[in-house]
Amino acid sequence: SPRSRTSQARRRPARRPQQRSLDTRERLVEAALHVFAQHGFEGATTREIARRAGVALAALPYHFETKQALWRAAAHRIFGQLGETFAKRLEGLEGVDTPTRLRLLLRDFVRFQARHPELHRFMIQEGIGKSPRLAWLVETHIRPIYDFVRTLLEAAQGEGLTPLGRPEHLHYMLIGAASSAYALAAEFELLTGRDPSDEKLVAEHVATLGRLFFPGAR
């Protein structure tokens, strides 16, 4: 009816600015993640984040009042994506044997690192010194992942599927082995002439890690 069409027309202008605001926020968070991963919190500037996002610096406080708020939003973004990856995989692993769980979760983790090298870079920047930011990050995002991985490693050790050793050491060894080639992609490419994120290389990487860390999971 004419009345309903008029009502819809009135609502459209209100939605468009809101969508533009959401799009701007998304660009700022994505840009912030990369800048914080490259420079760390102290070295990152809101000017560089705004420039990378294509947003006027004067508009940034409208979306994030402080650099700290922007940093937290970036952390939520990358760890949220990792959590979704694991959750999606675990949905289909109910009742599946431990070797299969190990193989599939390891494959998903390596592939995630290949697609998102900024995760490991972000953590290297934050993990080298104690700070309230790191304490928040550990309790909000890292500890749940650590507890999950530790439980899985201990179960695998109980079944003789992975080498013996302290689970916390295996946890960090596994993270480093799965992440370093992608976090140091420029070095990798200069040394080898290969792109570490090449699909074939990633598949070979997954297979190699499986043999190293889970030799009993055939």
Image: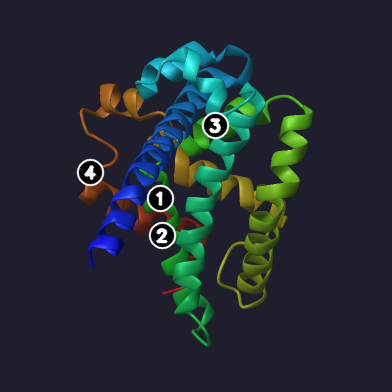
Answer with mark 3 or mark 4, whichever residue precedes in sequence.
Answer: 3
| Picture residue at 63% right of the left edge, 52% below the top | 170
Q: How is the image coloured?
A: rainbow
Picture quarter containing residue 183? top left
For the residue carrying disc 1, how many other residues have a C-alpha within 10 Å: few (<14), some (14-19), or many (20+)?
some
* Amino acid on which disc 1 is placed: Phe
Answer with mark 3 or mark 2, whichever residue precedes in sequence.
Answer: 2
| Picture residue at 54% right of the left edge, 26% below the top | 62
Picture quarter containing residue 194? top left
Answer with mark 4 or mark 2, whichever residue precedes in sequence.
Answer: 2
Query: How many angstroms separate mark 3 from mark 2 (CA)?
Result: 19 Å
Give residue 122's mark: 3
Query: How many angstroms separate mark 1 from mark 3 (CA)?
Result: 14 Å
Q: Using residue 18 as the reference point, say whether residue 60 is left or right of it.
A: right
In the rendered image, which residue does mark 1 sit on?
Answer: 112
- The single residue placed furthest to the front in the displayed view is 3
In the rendered image, which residue does mark 2 sit on?
Answer: 108
Q: Is mark 4 on a helix, strand or loop?
A: loop
Residue 52: x, y in percent? 37, 20
* Amino acid on which disc 2 is placed: Asp
For the residue carrying disc 2, how many other residues have a C-alpha within 10 Å: few (<14), some (14-19), or many (20+)?
some
Q: Nearer the viewer, mark 1 or mark 4?
A: 1
